Image: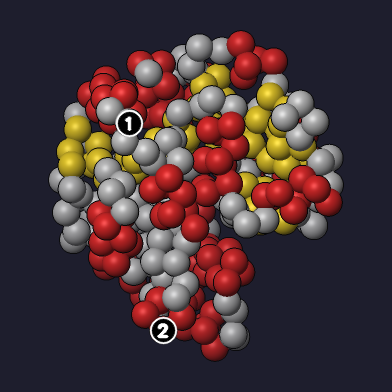
Amino acid sequence: MQDWLQIAPEVRDARAVVALESTIIAHGMPWPDNLATARLLEQQVREGGAVPATIAVLDGAVRVGLSAAQLEALAQSRDVLKLSRADLPYAVASRRAGATTVAASMICAHLAGIRVFATGGIGGVHRGAESSFDISADLEELARTPVAVVSAGAKALLDLPKTLEYLETRGVPVIGYRTDEFPAFWSRKSGLKAPLRMESADEIARFLATKWAMGLCGGAVICNPVPEADEIPAAEMREFIDTAVAEAKARGIAGKAVTPFILGRIVELTGGRSLRTNIALAASNARLAAGMATRL
């Protein structure tokens, strides 16, 4: 592994580590908000007593823990691949720069021995999946890779009931952190019940340790609702989402390009408000993940 897996010394030597994705840097936000957000998330992890490990593929290697220079270069790069399980070895073998999605970040975190990963929102079952079969690889990764994912639920542009059903079928625990409701990314409520509820990072860490000690494979989704002061209520978001989804369909946008297009269009439709909410929820998730990592 020495040739293609490079773990930063600080990450390698730490007792508590939180993995962070890089798609939010390369594809999720515009410059310079993406770099400021990446730095903020790392800061939140440090303040929580853990070491951040932002993950990306650079120069033919999976990098677990980026330097300040690497972080800035990635934030300004334009030709960066969006990596999931299928593309990860291609980026390494071809020495292409790649930003890791939830699925790819989980794989790399597991390779580096990291058990906790913080992101914004997980992918899921897309609307119309019954005919398009468009289902995020994030869900299958959660079923197979033993990494806990802290998120603000699934992105509200998805089919949330089908996403929850898929996770249940694959045996993935979905835990509401101090909530009985499955959050919908920008919104605290979706109208859907969270299967489990836990009140503290301690309680979640005990649950995860027990799950893995029992030999139960796969990860878990820890649902941390966006802070109340930063949320956009679901009823208000619905119109923006429907407009952006309809535009993506009209333009024939499909596959990996769908989510970045819709998220970018929603930022425009909300006058930047959704971006501010995205940053707030990602920071909140990083703080919770740090608490879990220190206890694990």
Quarter location, residue 56: top right
Instruction: Return the x and y of residue 126 as percentages of the image width and height.
Output: 41, 70
**Which quadrant: the N terminus?**
top right
Q: Is residue 179 above or below residue 110?
A: below
Compared to residue 151, the image places residue 167 above or below, namely: below
Q: How is the image coloured?
A: secondary structure
Which SS class for mark 2?
A: helix
- Which label was assigned to residue 111? none
Cα separation between marks 2 and 1: 36 Å
Residue at 37% of width from left, 80% of height from top? 130
Figure quadrant of the C terminus: top left
- Which disc, if any, is residue 131? 2
Q: Which residue appears at 37% of the width and 38% of the height?
A: 217
- Label 1 element class: loop
Mark 1 = which residue?
215
Drawn side of residue 98 relative to residue 141, left or right: right
Q: Could you tell which of marks 2 and 1 lies nearer the N-terminus? A: 2
Q: Amino acid at mark 1?
A: Gly
**Can you see residue 236?**
no
Q: 226 and 170: which one is in front?
A: 170
Residue type, numbered disc 2 = Ser
Q: Please tell me in which quadrant of the rendered image residue 92 appears.
A: top right
Visible in this render: residue 51?
Answer: yes
